[in-house]
Image: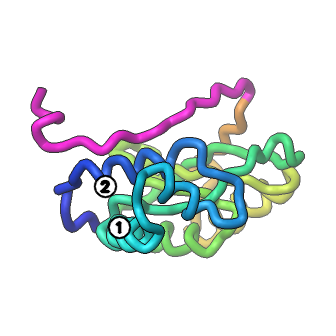
Amino acid sequence: MIESLNLDDLDKRIISALQQDFPIAQRPYDSIAENLGLSVDVLLERTRKLLADGMIRRIGFSLDSRKLGYKSTLAAVRIPSDQVPTAASIMADIPEITHSYERADEFNVWFTVIAPARNDIEYILKKIKDALNLSDADILDLPASRLFKLDARFSPQTEEDCND
């Protein structure tokens, strides 16, 4: 839960630095701190607070699964709203599901699956279907036929920025 949207300029600079050109180094935070003109202790303290406040959700690398030979799909299920927490719990326990989210739509829980082979994805979708007692019509499997990769980088905004 985001406790505070009150980001100062240093928080914004830290978030930006963590998203862009993260150094591949033995001590990456030393490099980032030096580039920001901070001590490593200050950088780590502020970063931990941003994580605790929910302003940063995750720090980690992202591999191009296609280059590793993996397969992926976008999937969705149509379930009653009272089953959403159950679906979320089931999906959270499946490491091949990279993320899931609820939508206000007929198919109301969407998620991505990345696995070594197509049959692994089919097994995972069947496992979800069985666990939620779904019919074939209640689950969508939408593997990409063309890929468009967006480089999403987020810029922290103040409430004033949102009102402009």
Q: In the image, is 133 to the left or to the right of 114?
A: left
The correct choice, above or below, for 150 with respect to 108 in the image is above
Secondary element at image label 2: helix
- Left-right relation of 52 to 76: left
Kind of residue at badge 1: Arg
What range of the chain is rendered magenta? 145-164
Q: Is residue 139 left or right of residue 119?
A: left
Q: Which residue is identified by label 2? A: 11
Q: Earlier in the sequence, mark 1 or mark 2?
A: 2
Q: Position of residue 3 (x, y in %)?
A: 21, 67
Question: Callout 1: 10 Å neighbours few (<14), some, many (20+)?
Answer: some
The image quadrant of residue 140 is top right
> As shown in the figure, which amino acid type bears the numbered disc 2?
Asp
Helix, strand or loop at disc 1? Answer: helix
> Which part of the image, by quadrant, shows the C terminus?
top left
The numbered mark at residue 46 is 1
Rendering coords of residue 75 (x, y %):
61, 47
Residue 146 placed where, x, y %? 72, 24
